[in-house]
Image (spheres, helix red, strand yellow):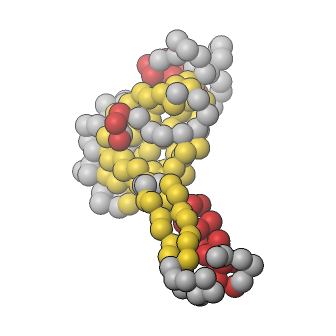
Amino acid sequence: MLNNSTPARLVAAVALCLTGLGFAAASASPAGAAGSNSLTVTAHEYSCVVDVTTSDSAITLPGGALPARRWARITTTASSPRDFELFRYATADATFEAASTYFKEFFSSDTSPPGPAPAVIVGNISSIPQGAVVYYRLSFDLGRYVVVSDTATDQDGSAQVHQDFSVP
């Protein structure tokens, strides 16, 4: 029987840590007879990290989307360093093309184009070298998003790849 003894508090702390680190469930039970100090801790694991890969021609998301909460492990197989950028579409009918045009004008002129922005910048990681691994904490509200990958030297958008996804 578990009580307020040190082993019970320790098991509760371990169970809480396992749950917080991405384990779906953690439980503790006594392994021996009443009064025994040995305990069994069982944890059921699920991945709290999703793999994302960028290349010269595509972005690969798990199942074609990113989850609302977790960590993304981002790697690139591209021939040169790639940026990883996340945008949330501002309206239901916003498109990547409209957002791309808006932000190209904004960043090249340093002034806001007329009208509302079709997307909002959520976050980015700049210049991920080939073969490097970086982590990004995912924390999305419900909505439509686009992930974009580009090179630092791309001036005309020809090296840009993107993928739309939704967080239901």
Tell which of 116 and 54 is nearer to you: 54
Q: Is residue 112 above or below residue 8?
A: above
Tell which of 4 and 35 is nearer to you: 35
Q: Position of residue 45 (x, y in %)?
A: 43, 59
Q: Is residue 160 above or below residue 127?
A: above
Q: Position of residue 15 (x, y in %)?
A: 59, 68
Tell which of 53 and 109 is nearer to you: 53
Q: Is residue 6 above or below residue 56?
A: below
Is residue 155 visible to us here?
A: no
How many numbered dots are placed on residues in this image? 0
Tell which of 83 and 73 is nearer to you: 73
Q: Residue at x 38, y 60 (%)?
A: 133
Is residue 60 visible to us here?
A: yes
Q: Position of residue 96 (x, y in %)?
A: 45, 22
Q: Is residue 45 above or below residue 155?
A: below
Which residue reaches farthest front? 33
**Left or right: where 130 falls relative to 37:** left
Q: Residue at x 55, y 77 (%)?
A: 30
- Quarter residue 132 falls in: bottom left
Q: Residue at x 25, y 37 (%)?
A: 57
Q: Position of residue 164 (x, y in %)?
A: 42, 27
- Quarter residue 162 falls in: top left
Q: Residue at x 64, y 83 (%)?
A: 7
- Quarter residue 60 falls in: top left
On-image quarter of the N terminus: bottom right
